[in-house]
Image (tube, rainbow, N blue to C red):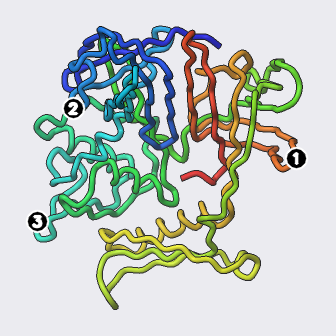
Amino acid sequence: MTADWRFYSLDAVTRTVRDELPLGDVRINERLKGAGGLNATIPRRHPKATRANLDTETTLIGAVRDETLMFIFTLQNATSAPGDETIQLDGVGLWDLLRHRTLRSAAGMTHGTWRASELAVRFTSVDQFRIVEDLLDHTQTMAGGDLGIAVVYDVLSGVTRDRTYKANASSVGELIEELADVEDGFDWALEPGGTIDQITLTLRLSYPERGRTTGYRFDADGGPTTEPDAGGGQTGSGNLLAWGLSESSVDQIVRFIAVGAGEGADQVVAVAEDPNLLGALPLREGRGAWTDITRRSTLTTHALRELALNSRASRIPLLLARPDAEPRLGSYILGDRVNVSIDDGWVQVDGTYRVIARTIQLGDDGAETVGLEVAEIERFA
């Protein structure tokens, strides 16, 4: 499928458009609960390849598809090796900025309280979505820290948490990721909206998970046909150009030990294990440290989540979708559930999966090639 993609250099502080950029070799990747990234090139001597347009300290790159704002990236690297005719550009999604914003105090918060004796912020029986709101409000009230991010959700999650966060010990982004990646956690996505001239940013929270049951089908067999699903949408058939499978037991465990704050006999420790796998699989144990966690109940949620994710080998089908067949780019989002059917020797896939990652590669004529990673239900952090 061919689309009209346009790329722009923006000032990272004011978000005003500087210029349109003639990017080539474009590769965009996005991942559920991740920052995403951009790789591209620009001719080294092109009149728009200026120092101002490609300043890695002050530049955002906006990606617009058919007049719809799709992505915003922070330009991190610009490299042109001796003899190269192009400049290699590397960007990362705006979520990365929150990974570089430190929790300092309870300033700007509604539900978190400052514990001066501990130099920490305390949340007691607070809905996890409210904690996210407080963390964002805190960093966006700092001098020069307003990113204009609005936190949005349909309803509160109904899951309350007790958390104590030491000041100047962790980033806001890391704290939100840790809050999401526990048993009974949530999904999140930082979404750009508006237009390239008036950008909005929304942190969308979803409980228990993001995405829909689409009825879409990715199938290695048959021709490019479409059939109505139960929800009135379309499903594809024979809509894969290529496929593969990544299987790994590198992180597989039957028991997980989570270590928290303290030392020696006073150290907080939580253990999770699957009795059904003890003796059925080789004994492999995992271990992780969350040294700022003082409550065993909180630590246990981390241990249970790690065990749930890694008690069996991970099996990730890798799909290269046909650009001229349904479902097309834009009709599904990360987190959606799709059906996948592949019968090809060692690659045996048949079931419902979640879309967890997407890679978009653009040809010089705007032709799109879309690569997908899908994960087994309940097997994605």
Looking at the image, tell me whether mark 1 or mark 3 is earlier in sequence order. 3
- Mark number displayed over residue 57: 2
Q: Badge 3, how many Cα within 10 Å: few under 14, some, many 20+?
A: few
Q: CA distance from mark 1 to mark 3?
A: 62 Å
Q: Which residue shows up at 36% across the image and 75% down it?
A: 260
Residue type at mark 1 is Gly
Total residue callouts? 3
Quadrant position of residue 147: top left
Residue 192 appears left or right of 257: left
Marks 2 and 3 sit apart, C-alpha to C-alpha, by: 36 Å
Using residue 48 as the reference point, say whether residue 228 is left or right of it: right
Considering the numbered disc 3 on the image, is that residue within a helix, a strand or a loop? loop
Q: Amino acid at mark 3?
A: Ala
**x, y percent for residue 76:** 31, 35
Q: Residue 344 versus residue 194: which sits nearer the camera?
A: 344
Q: Is residue 23 above or below residue 242?
A: above
Q: Residues within 10 Å of mark 1 (few under 14, many from 20)?
A: few
Rendered image quadrant of residue 262? bottom left
Q: Which residue is mark 3?
A: 116
Q: In the image, what residue type sits under mark 2?
A: Glu
Query: What residue would you read off at disc 1?
Result: 345
